[in-house]
């Protein structure tokens, strides 16, 4: 496939699938946050607060990547 | 009459030393990476009863996290070394837009961190607890599946342990197998540190429980 044959429609389809994939990843990060909360109820060993903060930062970072994808692609 | 044999007076002292609990000098404080804690003061679990004390708290030895950590390091090197080489070899006819490169790289690093974080959560919350009343095995098989098994100490019938491989021998960790009576499931404490000490503690508890009964 030569570059001339690749039209805007091609990149639009790629963009939609990329954003869809990242959106699924955001859902996964949300599941990690929820799961960390459930796990922390089972065990009280000290660093649960740190783990909770990391899980929320991870979720926020995945949202940021989704935002980046919408803006940059 | 000459004395032909005289009993060694120091022998009982040696016997007394041998019966000393093997874990008496272990710290009672835990830290986030604790994999073996004898009578920890700062650990509680969900279904713990008021008059129930944690005697032994176990996780898999931290060494089992090494493969995941090495894979994480390899994933970090991907965008810096592997991907540029790969793209040069492929010689794609189309130019990938800069936006895709940026988003793809950030997503890759995020996924790498996510991989290590979920592996750590899995290690951190998969625990084995021995209390003065029961043994408990809490497993988070994956992010969406949790399993909790428990059995009274008095139901324990048989115990054994295995230390396998170079790492297991070097770092003194292995599997402790506990067989229980009736329909109560058998327990496997996988890759726990000091398996012989774990067996000693559980065995002492078992004898104490049966002695009371």
Image (cartoon, coloured by chain):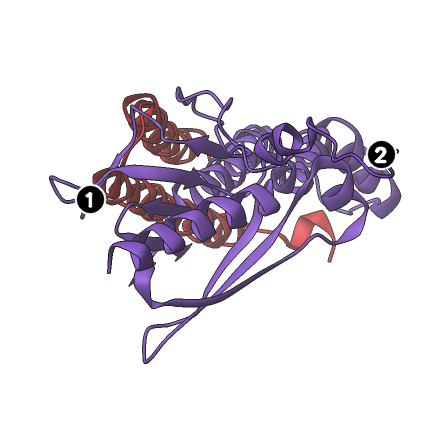
Residue positioned most to the front:
B1
Give the residue drawn at x 57%, y 32%. Answer: B16
The x and y percentages for residue A2 are 74, 53
Chain B's colour? purple
The x and y percentages for residue B180 are 40, 70
Secondary structure, mark 1, is: loop
**Which sits in the foreground, B124 or B60?**
B60
Please determine whether, in this image, residue A48 is positioned above or below residue A14: above
Which chain does the numbered disc 2 sit on? B
Quadrant containing the C terminus of chain B is bottom left
Q: Are marks 2 and 1 on the same chain?
A: yes
Q: Residues within 10 Å of mark 1 (few under 14, many from 20)?
A: few
Write down the residue under mark 2. B3
Quadrant containing the N terminus of chain B is top right
Q: Which chain: red?
A: A
Residue positioned most to the left:
B50
* Image position of A22 (left or right of B112): left
Write down the residue under mark 1. B46
Q: Residues within 10 Å of mark 2 (few under 14, many from 20)?
A: few
**Which sits in the foreground, B205 or B162?**
B205
Give the residue drawn at x 41%, y 44%. Answer: A22
The x and y percentages for residue A16 are 41, 51
The image's mark for residue A28 is: none
């Amino acid at each position: 496939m030569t570059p001339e044959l690749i039209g805007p429609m091609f990149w639009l389809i790629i963009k939609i699938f990329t954003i869809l994939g990242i959106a699924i990843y955001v859902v996964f990060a949300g599941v990690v946050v929820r799961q960390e909360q459930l796990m922390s109820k089972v065990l009280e060993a000290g660093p649960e607060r740190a783990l909770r903060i990391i899980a929320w930062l991870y979720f926020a970072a995945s949202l940021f990547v989704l935002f980046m994808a919408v803006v940059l692609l | 009459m000459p004395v032909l044999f005289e009993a060694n007076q120091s022998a009982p002292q040696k016997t007394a030393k041998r019966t000393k609990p093997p874990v008496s000098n272990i710290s009672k404080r835990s830290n986030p990476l604790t994999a073996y804690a004898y009578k920890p003061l700062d650990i509680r679990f969900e279904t713990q009863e008021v008059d129930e004390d944690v005697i032994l708290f176990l996780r898999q030895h931290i060494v089992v996290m090494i493969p995941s950590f090495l894979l994480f390091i390899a994933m970090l090197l991907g965008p810096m070394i592997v991907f540029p080489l790969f793209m040069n070899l492929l010689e794609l006819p189309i130019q990938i837009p800069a936006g895709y490169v940026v988003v793809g790289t950030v997503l890759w690093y995020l996924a790498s961190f996510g991989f290590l974080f979920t592996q750590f959560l899995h290690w951190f919350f998969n625990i084995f607890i021995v209390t003065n009343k029961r043994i408990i095995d809490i497993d988070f098989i994956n992010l969406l599946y949790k399993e909790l098994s428990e059995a009274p100490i008095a139901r324990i019938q048989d115990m054994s342990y295995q230390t396998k491989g170079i790492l297991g021998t070097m770092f003194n960790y292995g599997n402790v197998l506990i067989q229980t009576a009736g329909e109560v499931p058998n327990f496997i404490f996988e890759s726990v540190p000091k398996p012989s000490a774990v067996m000693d503690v559980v065995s002492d508890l078992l004898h104490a429980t049966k002695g009371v009964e």
